[in-house]
Amino acid sequence: VTQRPMPSDPLNTESRPQSAFQSVAIIGLGLMGGSVALALRETGFSGQVSGWASHPSDVDGALRSGALTRGAGSVEDAVRDADLVLLAVPVRATCDLLGDVAPLMADEAVVHDIASLKVPVRAAATEAGLLGRWVGGHPMCGSEASGFPAARPELFAGARVWTVADRGARESLERIEAFWRALGAAPERTEAEPHDVLMATASHLPQIVSTLLAGAMAQAGVPRGDLGPGGRDCTRLAASNTGLWLDILAEAPPALRSALRGLGDEARGVADALEAGDLTPVRKLMERGAAWGRER
Amino acid sequence: VTQRPMPSDPLNTESRPQSAFQSVAIIGLGLMGGSVALALRETGFSGQVSGWASHPSDVDGALRSGALTRGAGSVEDAVRDADLVLLAVPVRATCDLLGDVAPLMADEAVVHDIASLKVPVRAAATEAGLLGRWVGGHPMCGSEASGFPAARPELFAGARVWTVADRGARESLERIEAFWRALGAAPERTEAEPHDVLMATASHLPQIVSTLLAGAMAQAGVPRGDLGPGGRDCTRLAASNTGLWLDILAEAPPALRSALRGLGDEARGVADALEAGDLTPVRKLMERGAAWGRER
């Protein structure tokens, strides 16, 4: 990826640093993959960007926007000649694709996925014999919207991107880190298991809670327009793509189940305390939540 | 309140419409009361705005910002001569204040409160003999922050303000509606009971869920900085003022308890479905939430 020269360094405007990759294949051109393509174009990347998506309209949109240099007719067509194969599809499809692309990739090519869970993807990469060339990633950004029309080049600006790689893939990892930095993101190394456990609480739990809250609104006949800003924020994720999320939830670690049960019990506990007219336990929960919410 | 002339009506720049009130007393100068004072100033209101708050720093802040014409030394001092007494304090304090201000208010003065529940306030207004001059309100806007430093003049722009008034207070209601429209808000009439039942789902439930979600993050050791935008949105309300909310929850209608129990049961149900490996019920919940979330 060609990094933009720093505006404060006028001597550097002609000599861009060498790109981490020369030819990028993006499989999946929805919100995430589409945004990578758009962000690459914004950095002034001068190499090939080929793309394939299961929805032809996403390929068309990405081509029309100038984010791709080539729309590929198949995964095989996209991957050929690429030195970076970026998989930007849901977690199950990512695992399947790793097996598909392994025999198609150039010998020196790196494969990078951005699925929401890393344990199943790491297992698939191992099985596909790609562990030395695989780098897992998870950008902590996104939206409840999906498809290329929701993509935007600034999506990754300032976002943390968790990265996971085998010890033997250190050089690939460093190139992927440079790739994300060029897109304005902040890569940070972790391992597959702690990543997935973190996501159970940090990502899957808020998604399910938002879904349940939206369901309560639907049941009570409260339209979205009757919510204040707080209620709207809490239910925004409910509009997320169901298929994508079922895919994640099927692979979610057991930590999610215990978090859900804990939250469910506490919700009942609050109801019981309100009924008993003793708000002491509710005060404790609110103080705990507020202390956390005010932390830096 | 002096309304700004429409920019499209140049003939009207010199002749502002008559104000709904000439002298406004604001009791409570936190996020809500402070924002009313600031918004009033922005409309070019030329009458008196006196204010009192239990935190002297809020009075000082409001005076320094020019939002008040007079800082009052007491509630009695603030209310004297006002033709609008605006109570911008939590629900329990609102009920108490209604009894306090009743003997202090000028005969023609209107009292308007903006507490989050209307059933208890209506009962207090009845008891104070103010029902013919009381208009209840609830602006559907706000923030997790509190105190005058969080106040901002545009807080009410476009916000719905639920209003509740007795049949005998129709003229007062119309003046309060004009007051809110001048501040950019959209008043809408309702009654105390349906208002409070609506809030149980639309406002109290998201607050508690956000609190519980923040607690789960705290327990799992997930710092706020490790959340993506969705997780941050879902937990924003957790930083809300605990005292203010305990006050609301103590008066919340039974609908809140059943909503909490329903949500708690569903959270457990999702955990059980994940454990059983059958995502059919989870799919149904997600589709229901997504359908609601995508409604206009």
Image (tube, coloured by chain):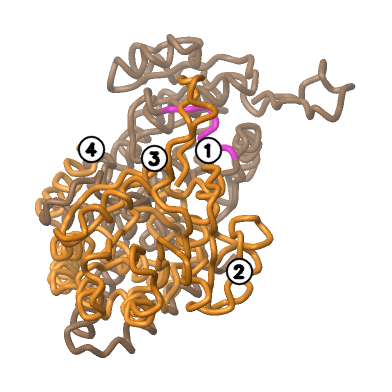
Chain colours: A brown, B orange
* The magenta stretch spans residue A153: yes
**Dots 3, 4 in contact, CB < 8 A:** no
**Callout 2 amino acid:** Gly
Residue linked to disc 2? B71
Q: Position of residue B115 (x, y in %)?
A: 33, 67
**Dots 4, 2 in contact, CB < 8 A:** no
**Callout 1 amino acid:** Arg
One can see residue A164 in this view: no
Count of picture labels: 4
What element does badge 3 sit on?
loop
Residues shaded magenta: A151-157
Letter of the chain that mark 4 sits on in the rendering:
B
Label 4: few (<14), some or many (≥20) within 10 Å?
Answer: few
Q: Mark 3 vs mark 2: same chain?
A: no
**Dots 3, 2 in contact, CB < 8 A:** no
In the image, residue A113 above or below residue B179? above
Q: Tell me which residue sits at (18%, 59%) in the image.
A: B198
Residue linked to disc 4? B294
In the image, residue A21 above or below residue A240? above
**Callout 4 amino acid:** Arg
* The magenta stretch spans residue A296: no
Q: Nearer the viewer, mark 3 or mark 4?
A: 4
Letter of the chain that mark 1 sits on in the rendering:
A
**CA gap, disc 1 and disc 4:** 40 Å
Residue linked to disc 3? A143
**Callout 3 amino acid:** Ser
